[in-house]
Amino acid sequence: MKIFAIMLKDLRLIGRDRFALASVLIVPMVVILVVASATQSGDGSESILFPIVNEDQGPVAAALIKVFRKHLNVREVTRESAEHLVADENDAPAALILPPELSKHYLTRKPSTIELLTDPAQWQELEAIKVIMLLADRETASLGDPFSQELLTVRERSITGNRPSFSSLEQNIPGFSLMFVLLTLIFSVSLDLREEEVWGTNRRLSIAPVSSAALLGGKLLARLIVGIAQLLILLLFGHFVYGLRLGNSPLALSLVVTVVVFSMTCFAAIVAGFVRTREQAIPVGLSVVFVLAALGGLFWPLYDLPKWMQTAANGAVTTWSMFALQDVILRDKGLAAVSPKLLILFAYGFVSFLIGLRLFRHGDGVGL
């Protein structure tokens, strides 16, 4: 009978925290919904931006563009805009240059070369484009199939770095590293503040001559240092064990890691503001991390996501963190080239800190 009495007592205690109890069911449903939407409802290759420079304006070029439009998000632009979209903005994995007099040469059985300007760092999207180019080969058979007659050859040229190709590990190692750092930060900040509430430390701090900004800032600064060390160690592990390249600029990599962890640490303070008990920390933390990892391209490329999720991803800290890491690691960009993304991440972290500070109420006897 005693065992049943203890069981009933614990069930009553569990039932008091209705938010934690509901989150046991709601949180998995939210994660399943996001992951299922990302893996089953994506727009696939149709969402891949594919700039085409049509310097020919002839029937062969028009036929090829028509085929590409069926499978890709084709945008006819100038050569300068195409290079900007691939090399600077990294919005497109590749751009196709159709040279002048392409149709004239084809009709007179003279070979021509079309140029494919690529960003190998977006290797998954690039592979999809190459597959669609094979499909274009088949679908243009009624026009004489220029590819198979070798009247058209494709010359591929990377314009974002010296490396022609990448492996899936170079997507997965940075992605999973960011996920685990974010997971650690959210759990550590949330649980640390809840433990101070249980131990009464926050009550003693509330009467100390310390401002809320200094108190929260000090707590987050400690987690920032741990997070920077964790991310660097994980990247170095990938470098020495799996040959992951870390770029050509140690300074750029160090600043990217610092700013990325800064933004994530400050974001963790917002999540902690909605966690009122230790029991809530695990389901809330896991749901936030998995949703942001799915949205931010830590698991799979963004083009696999539905349009609405791609739009939502622009507001996720993980998306910009992944962009910044890829610029340094995969595209060998220096500090100047990656600075716009660093400014976005810094602003994200600063705004997150202000929101977290607004939720931080150490003088009222609670942590956040």
Image (cartoon, rainbow, N blue to C red):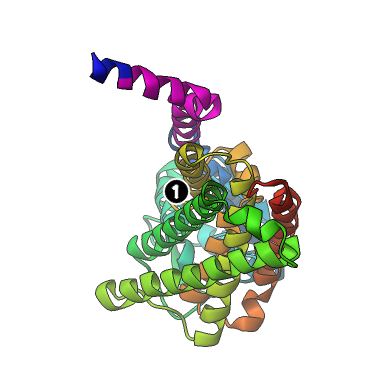
Q: Position of residue 258 (x, y in %)?
A: 56, 74
- Residue type, mark 1 in image: Ile
18 within the magenta span: yes
Callout count: 1
In the rendered view of the protein, which quadrant contains the N terminus?
A: top left
Magenta: main secondary structure equals: helix
Residue 257 visible from this viewpoint: yes
285 within the magenta span: no
Q: Quadrant of residue 146?
A: bottom left
Residue 116 visible from this viewpoint: no
When the figure is inspected, residue 338 is found, relative to residue 54, above or below; the finding is below
Q: Position of residue 109 (x, y in %)?
A: 47, 62
When the figure is inspected, residue 28 is found, relative to residue 49, above or below; the finding is above
Residue for point 32% across, 71% down: 238
Secondary structure type for disc 1: helix
Residue for point 72% across, 48% down: 359
Specify start and end residues of the magenta stretch as a single range: 6-35
Of residue 292 and residue 106, the one placed in the foreground of this image is 292
**In the shown orientation, is residue 163 left or right of residue 161?**
left
Residue topped by disc 1: 132
Of residue 349 and residue 106, the one placed in the foreground of this image is 349
Q: Quadrant of residue 78?
A: bottom right
**In the shown orientation, is residue 293 left or right of residue 204?**
left
Of residue 300 and residue 100, the one placed in the foreground of this image is 300
Q: Position of residue 252 (x, y in %)?
A: 56, 82
**Residue at the extreme top:** 1
When the figure is inspected, residue 336 is found, relative to residue 22, above or below; the finding is below
Mark 1 nearby-residue class (10 Å; few <14, some 14–19, many ≥20):
some
Q: Position of residue 246 (x, y in %)?
A: 42, 78
